[in-house]
Each structure stands twice: as structure tokens, then as C-alpha cells.
Amino acid sequence: MQLKRIVLVTLLLFTFIPISQAQNGKLIDQVVAVVGDKKILQSDIESQRMQFRARGMDSENLRCDLLKELISQKLLLIQAEIDSLEVSENQVESQLDMRLRYFIRQIGSREKLEEYYNKSIPEIRQDFRELLREQIRTQQMRRQLISDVKVSPAEVREYYENMPADSIPMINKKVQIAQLVKYPPQSSQAERAARQRLLDLRERIMEGEKFSTLAVLYSEDRGTSSKGGELGFRTSDELDPAYADAAFSLQEGEVSSVVESAYGYHLIKLIERRDDEVNTRHILIKPQINPEQKQKVQAMLDSLATEIRTGEIPYEQAVIEHSDDKEYKMNGGVLVNPNNASNEFELDELPQPDYDAVKDLKVGEISEPYETTDEKGKTLFKIIKLVSKTDRHQATIEEDFSTLSQMATRKKQQRIIQKWIKQKKKETYIHIDESFQHCEINTY
């Protein structure tokens, strides 16, 4: 039940577009509940229900669950207003931009979103600005209520000991790994060749050939080449800085000169610019790594791996002295999991080359040097060390204190919010329409 509630709250906080009002079949709206001076409409319930159903989540009690959660949100909103929790226009506009971009990408284009709601983007923004402001204030109030919540080691142990045996979570196999990274140097000749290829393609475009066709044929960005190099609408924060600078300086239909970014070299064509977003096509060419350079790096790492295995140099020192990975080299190459900010990864979270390198290692062993690519598609070589490993097991205090502490903290936070809401229901006028009287909602 708690998991169901967490999912419900999460989706309600993220969702803000009332689908039911966008359909051709108009919903006959009515007030189904009043909380203090706040109204909850039938359309509020139905729009949220339709979005849950679109995600494959439905139950006979879903309407009642949604009403309960919306009542809780109204209570939080009322308190936020009493406490004068302010939301800046920048916060609202930033969140509105982010969520509109999300829904545009989900539905396919701005035009499709406008068609779906039979409204222009400015009208959609206007319709949902105040609703989003309320949601942000509600989130702020929720965070304020639990900001000081902490759990002691004794509370974590008590939480664990009181868990039913069949509720103790299974912890998947996890590893801690460290990496030593070397990039083969790019020769000036390879860089000149990449630039020249793009200059030749630019000349063909200027002579009338279609940018999109040449992107399909020659771009080395596999994610966009099949779409004629089109990236879709992006803000400057979503683009490489050099790429963004060039893209935002173009006129619609204009093609850039050669642009160097962290990914390689580009030609960029501006399709359209709207507010703080641009939609561009690009052709990416990466300088080719000389096979001899690869062989030199491979040989260097082979020798270094031998020195590490024979104890001539500790792995951590080798990382500090030789790794090209600036982010992790000073902590011995130990990686941080971006999903949870810990040093542990489930094996399936690792990229395939790293998975293959580490899966058969014993703790403390290092892999053979292997070739792979980074997140920007650049060629590199790695030596991986398996720092620690835990097999799949049922959670224990000794091995999984951090995970259990997080679970205990979340439960304590939920209890505090539930206790607060229970008290506020006693103090606040709440009326529920007879159409929802079958729901077991205790309004005191």
C-alpha cells in the first residue's frame, strides 16, 4: 500500500495537463469536494485517472485514491499559503518549460500537442501556469514538513527487525569498480581530414544538395543520422556549449561553418528557433584514430597492468599518475553511480563493455585493457578494478545498512506527513459530494 501511495504522489506531482478537458467529448464538470476554500473538480479526478490508465495503472478504487491524494494536496497548499511560501516566476517558468518539453517529446512535436489540446502553446502555458504554481508550493510544503527528519541507527535496526520476513527486500548483486582511462591521441592530420570532409560536404550543400540527405549518408551520430541529422528542440543547457553557441547564432535555414565540440566536428543547420530553444540538423564527423596510436596505448596499458599485478605500483597510484579521467582519478578511479550517488552499481547498470570486463573478476583483481567509448562516443581504453562485490541476497543490517536507512527515513517521513494531514483534516472544513460518499475518506 505504501509503494502504491508513493507512485501515486510521484505521478500526481509530475502530471499537470488535464487530458479530459482536451478531448472532443466534453466532460460535464462539477465540484466533487471542498477543502477549506479550495475546490476539487470532477475533471481533476478524471484527467488524472486517464493518465494513470494510459500508463497501464488502474483499479476499481483509483478514483477514491486520487480524491484522497488531492484532498491531502489541498491541505498542504492551504498551509503553504498560511506560511507564505513563495514561488518565484523563474521557478514556475522553468518548470513549465521543462514539462512542456517533456510532453512535446512524448507526443512528437509542438504542432501535435497544439492539435491534441486544440490550443496554441501560449494558451496551454497560460492555462497551466497557476496549477503548476500550486503544485510547486505543495511540494515546498511537503519538503518543509520533513526537512529535519533523520533516523538513528537504533531506529534503522528497529525498522528492520519489525519488517515481516516476506517484506525484507532482496538486494541485487552489486559491485564497486574503479577505472583507469587512456585516450589515444588524435593526430593533427586526422583533425584536418575531419574538417576537410565537412568543408567538402558544406560546399555540396551550398550547391544545392539536401543537408538531410548528406546527414543520412555521412553523419557519424548514429542517434540522429537516420532522421536527417535532426536533434529536435533543445535549450542551450541541453547542448554542448560550442554547438549551442553556433546554433543560436544562425538564422533559420543557415548552415554553419565547421564547429568543433566535445563530440567531434559538426556542420549545423538551424531549422527553427523559438524562445530559448532551437531545432537543428547536424552532420558529425569524428577524427579517425590512427591504428598505431591505438596499439601504443594498448601496449602501454598492458605493461602498466603487469606492474599493477606484480605489485610494482598500486592500482590507485597508477590511476593518479596515468589516467585521463579527470573526474575520478584523484579518488583512485572509483566510480559514482549517477542514479543514486553511491559507489555501488548493479551489474546490469554497467555498459556492456564494462560488464564484460568485470563480471568474472574476483575482488581486488584488474581486467585486461580493453577498447570502448565514452558518453560522447570517443574511443578510449580502460583497465577496470573490482573493488568490492556483494551477491544477490536478502537485506541485512550488516551489509545493507545504507539501503535500510533510506527505507526507514522514507517511512518516517510518510508517517509525519500522514500524522500532519490527519490533524489538519480535523481542523479544516471538508465536504465531499455524494457521488464519492462510497469512498472511505475519513474527514473527521
Image: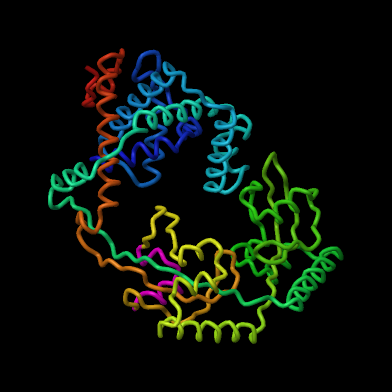
Query: Closest to the observer: 238 or 325?
Result: 325
Query: Closest to the observer: 396 or 29?
Result: 396
Percent coordinates x, y for residue 125 in the rendering: 58, 31
The image shows residue 126, relative to residue 214, as above or below, that is above
Residue displayed at 60% across by 70% down: 378
Please identify the quarter of the rendering in which residue 97 is found: top right
Residue displayed at 43% across by 29% down: 140
Percent coordinates x, y for residue 277 in the rendering: 67, 44
Residue 414 lies in the magenta stretch = no
Quadrant (top left/top right/bottom left/bottom right) for the C terminus: top left
The image shows residue 360, relative to residue 284, as above or below, that is below
* Tally of marks: 0
Residue displayed at 77% across by 69% down: 198
Please identify the quarter of the rendering in which residue 274 is found: top right
Percent coordinates x, y for residue 421 in the rendering: 29, 24
Q: Which residue ends up furthest to the right in the rendered image? A: 207
Percent coordinates x, y for residue 62 in the rendering: 29, 35
The image shows residue 82, relative to residue 101, as above or below, that is above
Residue 352 lies in the magenta stretch = yes
Principal secondary structure, stretch drawn in magenta: helix
Magenta highlight range: 346-360
Query: Closest to the observer: 269 or 261?
Result: 261
